Image: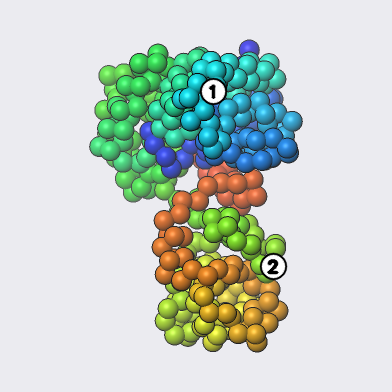
Amino acid sequence: MCKKIFIGATGQHCGKTTISLSLMHLAQKKYQRVGFMKPIGPKWVEFNGSIVDKDAAMFSTVFGVEEDVELMSPVTLAPGTTRRFLDGEIDPEAPRKAIRDACECLEEKYDFLIIEGAGHGGVGSVVGMNNARIAADLKAPVLLVTGGGIGNVIDAVELNLALYQREHADVRIIMANKLVPEKRINTLGYLEKAFAGTDIMVTSAFDYLPTLADPTLLHVSELLGLPLKGDPTDRSRLCHTIQLGAASSQRVIDSLDDSTLLIVTSSRDELLVTASSLHHIPEFRKKLAGLVIGGHVAVSDITQRIVDDSNIPYIRMVETSSEIFYQLREHVSKIGPEDREKIDLINSIAERYINFEAIDAII
């Protein structure tokens, strides 16, 4: 018999995918066959000739189960899907049937199945299948991922619990994630007090770790919709800091932090040449992950040749440096199949912080 767990969250960016990856890793130490499913896919991609959710594509690649990717992503919300559903062009029962049928097939193939929801409890309501309803329909116990505070977490949990209870879904675990390290014990203590009168177990996941939120050079390229030039082997490199190169060249270089993505105006020849030249020196290569060169003015021919010859990773775009800076600072990085550095880090931290045996025992 296949055991199941539904990974929900109180909102976006709580870390559902990180927790799902962690549980996949930990479950594989106990169960021979561990599967994944993303019933509703709000962010779709074309993968091996199929339209599937991005997370399903990522999990199928990381865990080598590409043949199951269509079962892992039975319903995707492609552009126009919601309007077609509301206009009656899609059978109201079609999403529910597709999700049920896919889950039944996966249950036959796997001993442990992780089902990841999308966003907060209400996501998917537009097609009649929100997270809470899916969890209830699939009879999967729910693990609800939250942020790392106290008052705001309790408020968000109560708001989501109302929907899960209305749909008769079985929420068994609240998992606080992105905890402030020095407040970890205190935060968990108060959350346990807040839910002491329920049958819900309160547990914890990761401390807040900026590395997991840092984008790779490839993510930046995809976000900006522009090619990443230079050394292709650096595409998975994490950018820990995003810095605007507005000061003098010497001050910019002196102030570089570890693995900085430097945003430079196209007319700053001296800074572009200096940064490109330093790319060959290991000490500075560690500090400088790559460049985003912005501005309407063309880079001079000789400077462009120096940049290209250095093989430093860079992205060229016409927006101003300040526009690029604020766009990237607001970006929340998601995990992709090429992010082996992040995935390996997640797995190693999960082994220290997540009590899989306690979770497995309660579902």
> Mark 2 near mark 1, Cβ–Cβ under 8 Å?
no
Q: Position of residue 211 (x, y in %)?
A: 50, 54
Q: Around disc 1, counting alpha carbons within 10 Å, would you say few (fewer than 14), some (14 to 19), or many (20 or more)?
A: few
Identify the secondary structure beneath mark 2: loop
Which residue bears the numbered disc 2? 231
Residue at x-position 63% and y-position 35%: 52
Q: Nearer the viewer, residue 127 or 19?
A: 127
Residue at x-position 52% and y-position 28%: 84
What amino acid type is highlighted by mark number 1? Answer: Glu
Side (left or right) of 121 relative to 101: left
Give the quarter of the image for residue 162.
top left
Give the quarter of the image for residue 232.
bottom right
What amino acid type is highlighted by mark number 2? Answer: Asp
Identify the secondary structure beneath mark 1: loop
Side (left or right) of 289 relative to 67: left
Which residue bears the numbered disc 1? 89
Q: Around disc 2, counting alpha carbons within 10 Å, would you say few (fewer than 14), some (14 to 19), or many (20 or more)?
A: some
In front: label 2 or label 1: 1
Q: Which sits earlier in the primary sequence, circle 2 or circle 1?
A: 1
Is residue 202 in sight in this rendering?
A: yes
Q: Nearer the viewer, residue 37 or 47?
A: 47
Quarter of the figure that contains the N terminus: top right
Q: Nearer the viewer, residue 152 or 137?
A: 137
Residue at x-position 39% and y-position 36%: 11
Q: Position of residue 110 (x, y in %)?
A: 67, 21
Is residue 357 in sight in this rendering?
A: no
